[in-house]
Amino acid sequence: MARPRSEQAHNAALEATLELLLREGVEGVTFEEVASRSGVAKSTLYRHFGNRAGLISKAAGQCLVEHPTPDTGTLAGDLKFLFERFSQAEDERQVNDILPLLMDEAKRDPEIDELLASMLAERRRPIRTVLQLAQLRGEIGADVDLDTAMSILIGPFTYRKMVERKEVTPEFTDAVMAAAIAGLRATAGAPMA
């Protein structure tokens, strides 16, 4: 069990790292800067986190929000529940800001790549389950590839935020959800290829 002082140092370092990550990007996170902002000695940072990637991984990983999988009885109800939760949680907004920063660094750092993969998997998990439930209810075709279906749902949000650099408004979310649900429901009656 960590000593209270050690735990305080650990938490202060993670808080300073997250702040730096959000303000300065991955490049701005250095042991020197984290030590300066948190008041935690560099030697303590190395002892707690090992290296810069470990520090970033721990800080970014703290923002990850586990979302329970809804089962409202309809694909539309389940997706509405999930996407409202995604948009309302403060930690979720931080994740939305952190993910693009990690994507570039993940190309060069295997530890950051592993963190990114686990964060993305956790974010996709409830959506995948909701789609599986919709398949079981016959709302979408049993042969629909769930990875493709998730791309149909998530892709417009990624494009809006990362390419267009625009806000994802409730109106945008409603339009994307309506179109995606209509397309996915149309597969329920589609003949097998």
Image (spheres, rainbow, N blue to C red):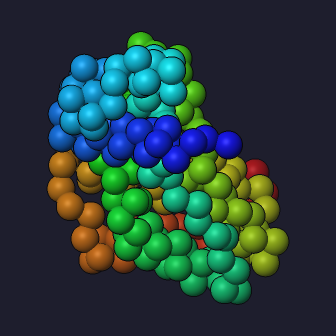
Q: Can you give x and y, in whole percent of width and height, for residue 125 in the image?
A: 64, 55
Q: Can you give x and y, in whole percent of width and height, for residue 60 in the image?
A: 43, 41
The residue closer to the viewer here, 136 or 42, is: 42
- The residue drawn where x is 41% and y is 59% is 92
- The residue drawn where x is 69% and y is 50% is 145
Corner quadrant of residue 8 = top left
Specify whether 72 is left or right of 60.
Answer: right
The residue closer to the viewer here, 5 or 101, is: 5
Number of marks: 0
Any part of residue 98 in sight? no
Does residue 13 lie above or below 105 as drawn?
below
User: Quick one: which residue is furthest to the top in this view?
Assistant: 108
Quarter of the picture holding the N terminus: top right
Any part of residue 5 in sight? yes
- The residue drawn where x is 30% and y is 48% is 97
Corner quadrant of residue 44 = top left
Q: Can you give x and y, in whole percent of width and height, for residue 16 in the image?
A: 29, 40
The residue closer to the viewer here, 154 or 152, is: 154
- The residue drawn where x is 78% and y is 78% is 137
Does residue 126 lie above or below 7 as drawn?
below
Does residue 164 lie above or below 100 as drawn?
below
Q: Can you give x and y, in whole percent of width and height, for residue 35 in the image?
A: 28, 27
Does residue 159 lie above or below 109 as drawn?
below
Specify whether 77 is left or right of 87.
Answer: right
